[in-house]
Image (cartoon, grey):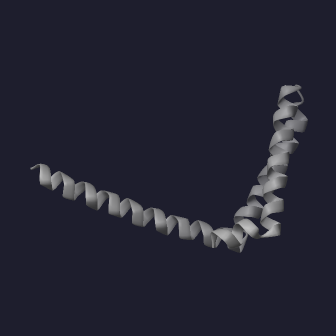
């Protein structure tokens, strides 16, 4: 899934556009242009929502969540086993 997400042109373009909007917002704040910063932040938020709504991204995030849950379970289990050895 990770390779598919990384190689998907629409997702790559969204990421590039998000980074550009965020940079523009930072520059607008730097040059004391609050309206431009607000607009750039809104654009970045909209692009982030488009990215989050992408089915591939949702599938990838779900897989990461499952992997993280498994890792947390294993870490907790191993820690309890190690703590049991100390007693």
Q: In which quarter of the image is residue 71?
A: bottom left
Indicate the position of residue 53 as horizontal and vertical percent values: 72, 67
Coordinates of residue 57 in the picture (x, y in percent) = 68, 68
Residue 70 to residue 27: above or below: below
Q: Name above or below for residue 28 compared with residue 9.
A: above
Between 60 and 85, the one lying in front of the other is: 85
Residue 86 placement (x, y as % from top left): 13, 49
In the drawing, does residue 83 fall left or right of residue 40?
Answer: left
| Residue name at image x 41 percent, y 66 percent | 70
Instruction: Please tell me which residue lies in front, 38 or 62.
Output: 62
Please give the name of the residue rendered at 84% of the width and 61% of the height, measured from the top-left corner: 13
Quadrant in the picture for the N terminus: bottom right
Does residue 16 appear left or right of residue 73 in this picture? right
In this view of the protein, which residue sits in the foreground, 38 or 76? 76
Q: Which residue lies furthest to the left in this view?
A: 87
- Identify the residue at horizontal 90%, vertical 37% (top origin): 36
Residue 21, above or below 79? above
């Amino acid at each position: 899934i990770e390779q598919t997400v990384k190689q998907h042109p629409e997702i790559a373009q969204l990421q590039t556009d998000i980074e550009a909007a965020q940079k523009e917002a930072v520059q607008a704040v730097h040059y004391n242009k609050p309206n431009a910063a607000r607009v750039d932040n809104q654009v970045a938020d909209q692009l982030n929502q488009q990215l989050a709504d992408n089915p591939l991204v949702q599938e990838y995030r779900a897989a990461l969540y499952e992997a993280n849950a498994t890792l947390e379970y294993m870490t907790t289990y191993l820690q309890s086993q190690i703590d049991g050895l100390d007693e």
